[in-house]
Image (cartoon, helix red, strand yellow):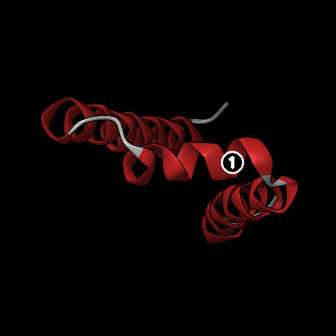
Amino acid sequence: MEPPDAALLGIAAVVAATVVGAVVVAGLLFGFDESVLRPFALLAAEPFAWIVVAALIVAVVGHAYIDRGAP
């Protein structure tokens, strides 16, 4: 993995960890009711949601690949 790709993956991991952390903190502060857990339940129950997440990941990685110039 080249440095720009590694940096992009690292940034995506930090953003994902921040989002999960925010959900956990919100759950601790306001209680783990249905509204806080709904995004995770949607990902677990809906295969279409995984397709959307995968498409976003492919778009970001593809854009980074094209932006740096494909070999």
Q: Which residue is mark 1?
A: 43
Vertical relation: 6 (above or below) 62:
above
Query: Residue 34's x, y, as percent?
Result: 45, 48
Query: Residue 12's x, y, as percent?
Result: 47, 44
How many labels sit on residues? Answer: 1
Question: Residue at 73% of width from left, 41% of height from top?
Answer: 44
Task: Locate residue 9 relative to residue 64 in the image: left or right.
Answer: left
Query: Residue 51's x, y, as percent?
Result: 83, 59
Task: Locate residue 70 relative to residue 67 in the image: left or right.
Answer: right
Query: Residue 40's x, y, as percent?
Result: 57, 43
Specify the amino acid type for callout 1. Leu
Vertical relation: 48 (above or below) 14:
below
Task: Locate residue 63 relative to residue 26 in the image: left or right.
Answer: right
Within-10-Å neighbours for mark 1: few <14, some 14–19, many 20+: some
Q: Nearer the viewer, residue 15 or 3?
A: 15
Question: Residue at 44% of width from left, 41% of height from top?
Answer: 16
The image quarter in which residue 58 lies:
bottom right
